[in-house]
Amino acid sequence: MASTHPIDPAFTSLPLRRLADAALQRAKDFSVEHADFRLERIRTQDISLRDAALQGASDHEQLGFAVRVVLDGTWGFASTDVLNKESAVRAAEEAVRVAQIARPINSERIELAPEPVHDDRTWVSAYEVDPFTIPLADKVALLAQWSEDLLRHPVVAHVTAGLRQVFENKYYADSAGTVTTQQRVRLYPVLEAFGVDEASGRFDSMRTIAPPVGRGWEYLTGAGWDWQRELAELPGHLAEKLKAPSVEPGTYDLVVDPSNLWLTIHESIGHATELDRALGYEANYAGTSFATLDKLGTLKYGSPALQVTGDRTVEHGLATIGYDDEGTQTQRWDLVSDGVLVGYQLDRRMAPMLGLERSNGCAFADSPGHIPIQRMANVSIKPAESDVSTEDLISHVERGIYVVGDKSWSIDMQRYNFQFTGQRFFAIENGRLAGQLRDVAYQATTTDFWGSMEAVGGPDTWVLGGAFNCGKAQPGQVAPVSHGCPAALFRDIRILNTATESGR
Amino acid sequence: MKVTPQELVEHALATTTSDGCVVILSTTTSTNLRWANNTLTTNGVMHHATVTVVATKGPASKATAGVVTGSAAAFEQITDLVESADAAAAAAGPAEDAQPLATGDADAAWNQPPGTTTVSVFDSFAPALGEAFGRARDAKRVLYGYVEHEVTTTYLGSSTGLRLRHEQPTGHVGITGKSADLTRSAWVGQATRDFGDVDALELDDELARRLGWAARSVDLPAGRYETLLPPTAVADLMVYLYWSSSARDAFDGRSVFSRPGGGTRVGDSLSPQDLRLYSDPALAGLECSPFVLAPQSTSELSVFDNGLPVSETDWIRGGELSSLLQTRHSAELTSLPVTPAIDNLALSVTPGQGSVDDMVARTERGLLLTCLWYIREVDPQTLLLTGLTRDGVYLVENGEVTGAVNNFRFNESPVDLLGRFTDAGATVPTISREWGDYFPRTAMPTLRVPDFNMSSVSQAS
């Protein structure tokens, strides 16, 4: 759905076309094979409260542009925040100079997949109220009110509250003639309550599981999440967690809530199906992938119930946009079908390596100062077609654990071995929930885990989760991304007791 | 005529209508090369200038703060930012961390222009890297890596008279080498201020040596092993410990440094060893800002503390927890000295002696790690961290490396490790594999842990 908001006039009144023309023309003077110009303005506001008192509020705006060229089969990239014509010309020259220096040590010719020319397109994300139009005092007052409500409960000793809001504008123009102007809004409200069990002296916390979303201020006033309900239930969850028995390590069946499963998808499917990782580009940093090119079409990634799509189009998705950072129109495609690996996430440089004629639109740079690289689309699991509820899944478990909310996460450099914890864990006994457990972590190998997925919930259990802070590349870049999934049932998963792991 | 950073700072201070104001202007130039599969992948040269305006209103004890950060290329942008900060300070409620702004004068370097770097910093490294690619191709090795050099010059001016300047060069190199069949992997990394001390061919030699160690592979199961953590792996763990040392979090009863029942664990013995964990802005080769730079208030930082001098601080001394990361506000809460965060970290053990190789030579049987990866907190109560070994776990037998072992997932607390290690090497400059891009200035020894907890095997190679 296209938004009804126009692109911010303060952005469109910048000399976008003039700077782009100057830079692209200068690059063409050097007979580059490709040149693109990307100007971005990213406004961020962070608010944090501690025990209902304002800890910090800060506004941040990043404004600048980058010129990227392919010269003699080699990349060159330069960026600056000085917005005038001379600076645009200089950046183009600098990008060319970088390509010239890099040319002798580049042995792989850069070829870009063709993309239809998108001439002067605009795209705006789906949101109702720009959060930057709400007075700071009103935002702080709402978070303080929510914090005070939590602090009134005797189990809650401390509360932190945070709200990050982003308003992002991108202007892109390239030597083929594509020109796009885009605008996205996203925000992430989060509250966490801390308590102490007087008997043992042990402390613990319970955090909201409301996901970060591509929405506006309306998200805090009722659209897309029931805050009143979640905040009312939080102290009770914390109290139960503080008194909960420590888990017996061993093998359990798991029913995993979307509020936890999104992160497992992110780490073990999202990153593993990035073609740049499979090709080794991230070998020195984020790592590679076990899902290498030779396994495309044959790798049994999971059980036949596993259907995974990549997309940059889902409404309110954090990776959703109209055109990516190299002018490719965004799409939706299959990554895993009936449990088998069938696709990757691509940019224009990598698509030809896969024998494809077109990129699927995953180029992204987190700032005007960084070069676009392949970043994650919204990678999501499809729900069952039938109306399977979370309770239905739980009813099929004799001895197991129901996992809710994400917390700790870690996975190895080839995306095999992972370990996750959560906000809360409920014992399942004979098909019913039987109270919380603590000190739980689940550990598995990616294909074993997804291979053990017996069933997924129906459309009513499907939730779009996600994160603002996915890290990749050198220099480090941070990307927002969403993952939708239903609740799901897994058999025979290894459960650790984290207190035992620490030698206590 | 080009506007100078000093003029922009003075313009901001002259424009504000608030009672107090701190302006932090940073100009950065950076350049990088990245490669994979023995060929260059991406590269770049970046310039940007960022300014943070902190406006404060009202009496010191009940002051409000408005904090706005933006790009700083022209007077008009600065004017807009100051107006926004003034408006935010007027609209905000009292800041919990309100304190009088730090006072002082102009330092001697204030008038100097900002430092810069260019892609020419790689003039000798890049051709050597090209030669290393050729050698690697001939020897059936595959190289992947990254170099970056950045110079950030920060100007801090305040309505209370401060005019401080700090120039920070930062650079690092990391190279991963793999065998042609990708079954063996090794890594080397180094921090540098100017690339004068980085030799691409020497780094490639070390990768070749390590891949040679992996000619014999040994499968070992999960379990507790005597383990040598080299300086980079110690940095991986100590940086996390340092970042978890907020006095405020400890005081609020939510960190490993909280005293059950209330207060902090400052004064507790964490280790029977004579170890010292400390930061010092003047540490040779690891020099960093000698004053507080706080672009926003957090648990460990206060915008009111901007410009406060920092000096050599022991976090752990003689094995005893001696300081936590403080703001003036948290120091009042905890009745402890004001010890703000400093941008470097060193661990030394008395009498730590020898290099990694020396430590290998005095090992009968154990594991030698390369580095750790994907480190995340599992339980803040004990600071239990999980993560993985990466790019080389080696078996040491009778004082020699005899083969490469599979990777492991570990679950360990760095605080517990300080209490359990039995032997340490000499402290040397190093860079954390996991955190070095964000916290590059560290010096660490090799540590021997008799019972490091390898929780499960990872198939990654």
Image (cartoon, rainbow, N blue to C red):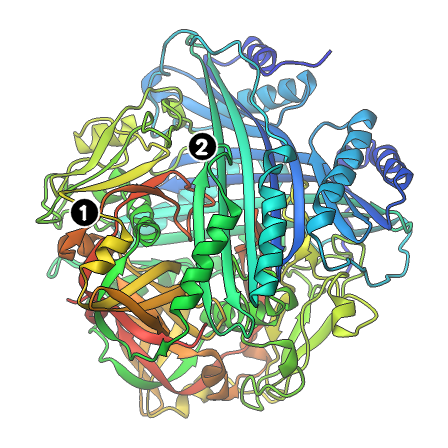
Chain assignment, label 1: B
Q: Position of residue B443 (x, y in %)?
A: 31, 41
Q: Position of residue A159 (x, y in %)?
A: 33, 48
Residue at the image point whose x is 28% and y is 28% from the top: B329
Give the distance between the C-alpha atoms of the residues marked 2 and 1, in whole angstroms. Answer: 24 Å
Q: Earlier in the sequence, mark 2 or mark 1?
A: 1
Q: Position of residue A395 (x, y in %)?
A: 40, 90
Pointer 2 with pointer 1, Cβ within 8 A: no
Q: Which residue is labeled 1 in the image?
A: B258
Q: Which mark is residue A178?
A: none
Chain assignment, label 2: B
Mark 1, other Cα within 10 Å: few <14 / some 14–19 / many ≥20:
many
Q: Which mark is residue B296?
A: 2
Q: Is residue B292 left or right of residue A241?
A: right
Depth check, front residue: A18 or A127: A18
> The C terminus of chain B is located in which quarter?
bottom left
Q: Amino acid at mark 2?
A: Gln
Q: Quick one: SS at disc 2?
A: loop
Q: Quick one: SS at disc 1?
A: loop
Residue at the image point whose x is 56% and y is 84% from the top: A301
> The N terminus of chain B is located in which quarter?
top right
Residue at the image point whose x is 50% and y is 70% from the top: A414
Q: Amino acid at mark 1?
A: Ser
